[in-house]
Image (cartoon, rainbow, N blue to C red):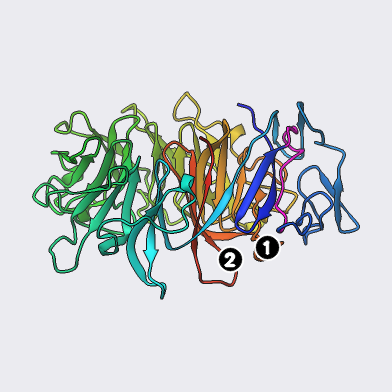
């Protein structure tokens, strides 16, 4: 896979363009500037970072970033910068990061050219759920029938459909699921006799992937999926309850993986992953015991292509990979460990944020899942160390993975940053700066990509401000 470095440039308030330089890895990358006011910190001819350093390929001379000797060049070529980053690139690419200006509560979910989000009232209090269409450049929500009545922190998106929870107060539908089709503007409530939620919590709630939504119910069968491929949602109950569960409170997390047509649940009774076959819902699930310290229920586990990334319950949240496509597999511990935010898996790649970063800082741990599952390709995983910005970046509170013009990218938010090579090598993380405060990174709370990895949504905020708006980037067509 070719890894193409990019340079971020500010084009105007709320809109940034990143263009491919064609340089070898280690010679490009970098932070953005401020609204036509000249190069930003770390950029060519811009001021040095406070640490007296610049982006990869540049040197700090008299507090100005100038071209360095290693990793330079344009057009085609190969080369190595500092650290372990190595690659080649050619051609051009673009990354547009847009502030929609839509106020949100921080919760969001991304689908096929739609982003659902927790809406707010003018006073900043929750106002249910709404959605927007990035390709249309929406600067306001399009409206969901009864949208303000749905739970602002319990929804999921798959394709162009939004799975919602709740309804008007006093109507007896607090634990009802409804499927809203944005393409046809139709709302389809799921009959409460077929599915009524139970044990709703901040994690392990309603999840979606492909043509399926999965959640926990108040009574047996506890784990149930919803097939949303047609005009009418169809409930798929898994008749063998996990670990003797009798209600949703006995199941801490659920997740659906459309690639392998499986649903996974975690029992609070015995710290076991139960893997169900969607095409054979009456069959007993496969069972995979967690590590000796159990399975952490503080972070939702990540999963794709039959591989789970999760934290154990040791109190240090050590990271583990588990391939559930083979009953003989067992969890494999990753280094570094200590997951500190929900991990993510996308295709053959994974990422999480670890407390075991350089000099006591948190850092990014990203990797490639080897085909000889579930071994980890150690040379493809690296916490950001010794970077040109001294480990200031490659950190954050939320991580996602997507695809930018054929290249896999990892995106972190705290300060919003992204990398085509996942943090290996010097200054691998490109930082996006706040147009309202040049030189200060753009901050946020949540970053999410859709199932295809082609659309990015994030909660956009500024230092010192309580306002949060919906930001997005169309990564690939």
Describe the element under mark 2 as helix, strand or loop.
loop
Horizontal and vertical percent for residue 296?
37, 52
Horizontal and vertical percent for residue 161?
31, 44
| Residue under the image location 57 percent in, 30 percent down | 406
Q: Residue furthest top?
A: 372
Instruction: Count residues near mark 2 (Cα–Cα under 10 Å), then give few for <14, some for 14-19, many for 20+.
Output: many
Horizontal and vertical percent for residue 385?
68, 47
Find out whether residue 357 is within the magenta segment. Answer: no
Say left or right for 244 vs 39.
left
Horizontal and vertical percent for residue 80?
76, 33
The residue segment tinted magenta is 21-34
Residue beneath disc 2: 462
Residue beneath disc 1: 440
**Can residue 253 be seen?**
no
| Image quadrant in which you'd find residue 148 | bottom left
Tag 2 or tag 1, which sits nearer the N-term?
Answer: 1
Depth check: 334 or 259 in front?
A: 259
């Amino acid at each position: 896979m070719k890894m193409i470095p990019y340079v971020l440039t500010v084009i105007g308030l709320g809109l940034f363009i990143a263009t491919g330089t064609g340089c070898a890895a280690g010679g490009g990358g970098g932070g953005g500037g401020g609204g036509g006011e000249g190069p930003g910190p770390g950029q060519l001819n811009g001021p040095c970072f406070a640490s007296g350093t610049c982006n990869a390929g540049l040197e700090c001379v008299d507090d100005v970033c100038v071209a360095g000797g290693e990793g330079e060049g344009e057009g085609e070529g190969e080369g190595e910068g500092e650290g372990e980053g190595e690659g080649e690139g050619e051609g051009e690419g673009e990354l547009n990061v847009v502030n929609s200006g839509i106020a949100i509560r921080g919760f969001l979910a991304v689908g096929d050219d739609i982003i659902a989000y927790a809406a707010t009232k003018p006073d900043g209090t929750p106002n249910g759920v709404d959605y927007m269409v990035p390709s249309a450049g929406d600067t306001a929500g399009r409206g969901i029938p009864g949208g303000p009545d749905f739970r602002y922190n319990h929804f999921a998106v798959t394709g162009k459909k939004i799975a919602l929870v709740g309804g008007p107060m006093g109507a007896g539908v607090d634990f009802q699921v409804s499927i809203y089709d944005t393409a046809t503007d139709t709302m389809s409530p799921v009959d409460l006799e077929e599915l009524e939620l139970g044990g709703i919590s901040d994690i392990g709630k309603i999840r979606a992937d492909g043509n399926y939504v999965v959640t926990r119910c108040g009574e047996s069968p506890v784990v149930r999926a919803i097939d949303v491929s047609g005009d009418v949602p169809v409930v798929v109950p898994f008749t063998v309850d996990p670990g003797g569960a009798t209600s949703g409170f006995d199941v801490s997390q659920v997740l659906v993986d459309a690639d392998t047509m499986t649903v996974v649940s975690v029992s609070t009774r015995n710290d076991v992953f139960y893997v169900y076959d969607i095409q054979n819902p009456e069959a007993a699930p496969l069972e995979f015991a967690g590590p000796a310290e159990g399975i952490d229920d503080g972070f939702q586990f990540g999963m794709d292509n039959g591989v789970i990334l999760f934290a154990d319950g040791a109190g240090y949240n050590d990271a583990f990979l588990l391939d559930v496509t083979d009953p003989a597999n067992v969890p494999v511990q990753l280094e570094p460990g200590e997951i500190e935010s929900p991990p993510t898996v996308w295709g053959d790649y994974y990422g999480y944020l670890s407390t075991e970063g350089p000099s006591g800082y948190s850092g990014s741990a990203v990797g490639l899942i080897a085909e000889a599952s579930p071994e980890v390709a150690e040379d493809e995983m690296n916490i950001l160390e010794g970077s040109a910005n001294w480990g200031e970046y490659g950190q954050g509170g939320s991580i996602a993975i997507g695809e930018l013009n054929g290249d896999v990218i990892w995106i972190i938010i705290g300060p919003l940053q992204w990398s085509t090579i996942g943090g290996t090598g010097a200054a691998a993380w490109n930082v996006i700066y706040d147009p309202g405060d040049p030189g200060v990174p753009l901050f946020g709370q949540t970053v999410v990509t859709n199932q295809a990895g082609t659309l990015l949504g994030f909660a956009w905020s500024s230092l010192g401000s309580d306002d949060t708006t919906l930001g997005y980037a169309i990564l690939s067509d």
